[in-house]
Image (spheres, grey):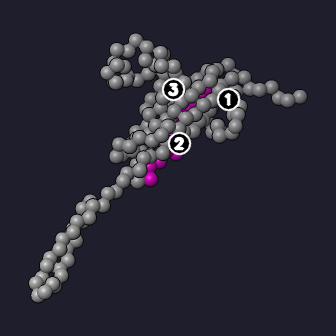
Amino acid sequence: MTKHHEGRILLFGAVLTLTACTELEIQNKPPKAKAQLLANGALVDLDVAMPPPIAFTGAPIAIVLDGTLSSDEDGSVATYLWMATDAPAYERYAGNGRVDSGILPPFAGDPPPVVAPQLSLGEGTYKYSLWVTDDEGLTSDPSTLEFTIGAAPAPAP
């Protein structure tokens, strides 16, 4: 945004007109990704030092990767990108001729690019990262969820 300022000065009987311009730049701030995990409808606290595994009972667990707390203080979140960031590169990009051109196709193990994708997962260790992009095209740093679905630890005697 450019603003023009004009002023007049009387100097030795002559009127001088001065014009000055100032440039005001409004900087867009990047959005913030915030990922949460729900297992079978309940929020899982992954902020503890060693989160316990999500109990596996033999049937796949209904998982929701929740990005609804992501935000953009000077606009709005326009897109959500979830990636299975524990997938090794040889698996993610194996046999793909487009990798060298820099155009990467979606990996079959990635969740859909929605705010809260729903997955059905079995036993294992998982790592998913969320990036959000705002309405001005800036992308956040990732918010990552790491969790294990497995046998619940035996109670202490």
Please state which amino acid type lies under the numbered disc 2. Lys
In the orientation shown, which residue stands out farthest toward the top? 95
Q: Secondary structure at mark 3?
A: strand
Comes first in the chain, label 3 or label 1: 1
Q: Residue at x 47, y 25 (%)?
A: 110
Q: How many C-alpha atoms fall within 10 Å of the one at disc 3: few (<14), some, or many (≥20)? A: some
Q: Is residue 120 magenta?
A: no
* Residue 80 visible, this orientation: yes
Q: Where residue 145 appears, x then y in whole percent?
A: 58, 34
Prevailing secondary structure of the magenta residues: loop
Q: How many C-alpha atoms fall within 10 Å of the one at disc 2: few (<14), some, or many (≥20)? A: many
**Image quadrant in which you'd find residue 106:** top left
Q: Which residues are magenta?
A: 59-73
Circle 1 is placed at which residue position? 54
Do labels 2 and 1 touch, CB within 8 Å?
Answer: no
In this picture, is 66 found above or below 109?
A: below
Name the one closer to the observer, 106 or 17.
17
- Residue 152 is left or right of residue 68, and the answer is right
Do labels 2 and 3 touch, CB within 8 Å?
Answer: no
Q: Secondary structure at mark 2?
A: loop
Q: Residue at x 38, y 43 (%)?
A: 138
In this picture, is 6 found above or below 134?
A: below
Count the marks: 3
Q: Where residue 107 appears, x then y in whole percent?
A: 44, 21
Please state which amino acid type lies under the numbered disc 3. Ala
Circle 2 is placed at which residue position? 34
Which mark, residue 84? Answer: 3
Q: Secondary structure at mark 1?
A: strand
